[in-house]
Image (cartoon, coloured by chain):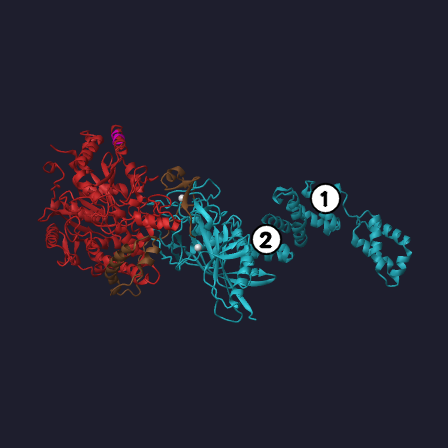
Amino acid sequence: MADLADLTISEAGVGLRAGDFTSVDLLEAVTKRASMTEAQLHAYLTLDHEGAPTQALSADEMFSNGEDRGPLQGIPVALKDNMCTLGVETTASSRILAGWIPPYDATVVERLKASGAVITGKTNLDEFAMGSSTENSAFGTTRNPWNTDKVPGGSSGGSAAVAAVGSAFGSFGSDTGGSVRQPAAFTGVVGMKPTYGLVSRYGLIAFASSLDQIGPFSRSVSDSVAMLEIISGFDPRDATSINARVPEFGRSLAKGVSGMRIGIVSDFMNPDIIDSEIIAATRAMADRLQDSGAEVVEVALPSTEFSLSAYYLIAPAECSSNLARFDGVRYGHRSDFEGTTEEMMAHSRAEGFGPEVIRRILLGTYALSAGYYDAFYGQAQRVRTLVRREFATAYEHVDALISPTTPSTAFGVGEKSSDPIAMYYSDLCTIPSNLAGDPAISVPIGLDDQNLPIGFQIMAPALGEEVMYQVAAEVERLADFTQRPYLATSIEVKP
Amino acid sequence: MPVDIDIARVANLARLSLTEDQLETFGAQLGDILEHAERVQALPTEGVPPTSHPLPMVNAFRADEVGECLKPESFLSEAPDVADGQFRVPRILG
Amino acid sequence: MTDWEAVIGLETHVELSTRSKMFCSCPVDVDGLPNAACCPVCLALPGALPVPNEKAIEGIVKIGLALDCEINESSLFYRKNYFYPDLPKNYQISQYTFPVCEHGELEVDVDGTTKTVGITRVHMEEDTGKSTHVGDGDGRIHDADHTLLDFNRAGVPLVEVVTEPDIRTSEEARAYGAELQRIVLALGVSDAKLEAGSMRFDVNVSVRPRGREELGTRTETKNVNSLRSVQRTIDFEIDRQIKVLESGGTIRQETRHWNENTGVTTSMRSKEESEDYRYFQDPDLLPLEVTQRWQDEIKETIPELPAQRRERYIAAGTDDVTAGVLVDNGELGALFDEAVDGGASGRSVGIWLTGEVVAYSRRNDIHIADSPLAAVHLVELTTMVDEGKLSSSAAKEVLIGVLDGGGSPSDVAEAKDLLQVSDTGAIEAAVDQVLSQNPDAIEKISAGDMKPFGFLVGQVMRNMGGKADPKIVQQLLRDRTAS
Ligand SMILES: [Mg+2]
Ligand SMILES: [Zn+2]
């Protein structure tokens, strides 16, 4: 028997409009899926048992009134817990924010609500989005629904897991160095990072302001388009928001890749760094794109070698300043330590932040401090310019770039948590797009020999979402990836 | 090249009260990471301008118009300590 | 004994009187209930982002242009990182390299000589919240039990004007502060209320033996909030530093605090280590581009500045002091302008306005703008004096009558019977009568002793009830007594 929770958003939308089921039914289905999987997954931090049913009822009322606000009306979706939700606890998975009830909605949340979407709840993440495994959460580790001994990736691991397992029809994460694409690859779903400035950051708890973008997780490329269309567009409350007409991202989904020039990034096909199975799968997909009529050429991006180093200076520098506001004065954790305000702040912060956050704050503070700025932060900013230029040059010759999303498939819980640098390497292929500000997407293309999903990355120039989705849709067709994680109970009945 | 870090000073700048053990651990880890991060210095960047913002945009403004404020109770209720409608903190060293 | 010279620089913070704050749409309203003018942005709630106020940018460009600055076509916002409970983000959005304005100068008048003070930079930033220290120490921070924080002021646009170390005396510093205040007021970008803290000074002082090029170690006294205090702070610091150096000590580079009640500066608890603000470009904000065209548009809106105004008043016949009073008092200045435009004598109008009129408004505690006095009255009044219809003392009386609501000057003069007699016949008769009563006086005068001349004038005036034109009386007496 088909379970509603396994439908894609577009399938669910068809059923809602046909009157086959209601939004309340959809919410029940994903809530039931959550109740069956959460004990093992721990993907949700908060399920909104009050707001979500109200929103579902109101969506159903809209349908019965003939009001249609688009593809997300009545669709239950989940939010990474670093997006502010009015009246619903928002923690960024940090002890320093435990219990905090925001008095405002993030712009993305406002837009989702306005589109008639149903917000199921808030998902787990690496504390303040710093991490690649969702192990750095103050509220427990999220597991991979394909194999609960494995991590779901991060930092948006909770959002990836709920989209993969069906405890929401889709979800939203944030991507600073790969935090949507890498967990999407690990959990076998589609995850995309928009062009920097396309989606408002207002209300997204900042990690690294010049890199952060909110992006969707979905079980199909066309769902990804629908979700992005709802959340993107100019926001006067975000000065870095692009003030231009939003392109129609999905216009070319059916066009195929015939006649396109696609570059495969040779630096990300290095067997010293990337698993051979992933290289093979990526190469095979590149060949099939060629068979579909694209011209696939090798493209070298030599300065991407330095991207990781630059990223691990720029992101910590920005975060050291962004996280200064967590001081125990106006909200969040305040230490019981009795002393001066200065001591109260220093103790509150040391008690409230987890080790990875402290590590990055220290790193960023150091990189910005007098005498080191030029050698570290300043140099990283100049390297960033070189990375941007290299991408720009590449896009003079190709329409899109392809590569693996990650060097490996999902790794084991605890496997890398004691080695920060090894952990940082899992963002190797995703970081360059954040530095460049360009859009990129991960599409699942198969399973490795451990039955773990492999992600395939498509990158495009700034505001090139349409081209990116065009290639992604072809990759999706060619891969025909229909397998479901074992934790999703009705694997075989996908319509 | 090992990187020399006055970790206690950095922690103090970052307003983090860390134990001696923590300082030692974080100091060592920072050294490792910075050794790696130092690779950025290998790229010649003379004459290359820094990127602070990935897109070449300028001048995002708002008009000088008054909008709605939050009701004080909506955020004071979240504060660790409040008195007389204000946030309260302990004695300040200055 | 060493001859010491002080080297002084001022950093002036000016709150702009925009409607909304610098980076959010909360009202610039510091008098409301605590924390009532706050939003996610100015409280630094997680996720909030700043968007700059265009009007504030225009405000700082106006100030820069008025101070003869170069306006950077492209300037950048930086974060100045330091932890302090009244600073919600624990960084202040400010500027570092590439401020909006650089390399300006301001000419100030110090006891009749012109002093040029270089302006290093004028940059845009945001204000902090307000702390109230509660406990035993009557508001002093170190003795307080705890501190209350109100963020209504947090995020109010703040312009910082930094001078070169060109100032040498406390008088120069005071004159500079006063002139800057006048400019800001003339531009209409700030209410520049020193007592309310919307304009405040950080005072940098060092001393060195006169003739030495090298600068001494400087101290910075923060948040001095009156011109008088600026002067006192500087005098105190110069004196203190010279004493320290002459007794063989050294000056510590430190931040000091001015205590208004005791009249001394004291060292604020010095931080264990030097400040390291870790400035970096704010990734939440885009570069600011003030194109030449925008600058030109802003330039169009700049009104006449105090220096130009002062020059114009002097050219119209006033003395320096009168011109100064007219510059500082917009109502009087406006009346003056209108009256002079209507043909009145600048010299007389200046004296009346800054004398009788100011005294009247003080005495009666009213604004001149609210009184019946209009520029046409001043024009009429000078005409009457010029035509000899009023004596200058009668003119003052008429002016008061006008201020009291007695109507036009001629109405008042008539009602009070103050019109001067210039009818030569009547005056001649009075002169002849007085002369016939005082033959001995005529004799003395004929002998070259002019002493009785004044007495004779007085007698004539008395007989005429004070209304004779004294010029005519004198002329007639001179004619008659000339031998
Ligand atoms: Mg300042
Ligand atoms: Zn505000």
Chain C drawn in what color? cyan
Q: Say if residue A17 shows up in the picture.
A: yes
Residue A195, percent across and down? Answer: 26, 49
Mark 1 Cβ and ligand 1 under 8 Å apart: no
Calculate the distance from the C-alpha at mark 1 to the C-alpha at mark 2: 29 Å
Element marked by disc 2: helix
Q: Is residue A116 left or right of residue A290?
A: right
Q: Nearer the viewer, mark 1 or mark 2?
A: 2
User: Taking the image as four quarters, which one is ligand 1 found in?
Assistant: bottom left
Badge 2 sits on which subunit?
C
Question: What x and y, as percent, mark residue B27?
Answer: 27, 58
Neighbor class of circle 2 (other Cα within 10 Å; few <14, some 14-19, many 20+) is many
Measured as percent of width and height from the top left, residue A162 is found at: 19, 40
What colour denotes chain A? red
Residue that label 1 marks: C410
Q: Secondary structure at mark 1?
A: helix
Asked if disc 2 is less than 8 Å from ligand 1, the answer is no
Task: Kindly report the secondary structure that dominates the magenta region of the rendered protein.
Answer: helix
Q: What is the magenta range?
A: A56-60
Chain B rendering hue? brown
- Between A329 and A106, the one lying in front of the other is A329
Q: Is residue A177 positioned above or below A43 on the image?
A: below
Instruction: Indicate left or right for C420 with C1 as reference.
Output: right
Dot label at residue A403: none
Tell me the amino acid under the disc marked 2.
Answer: Val
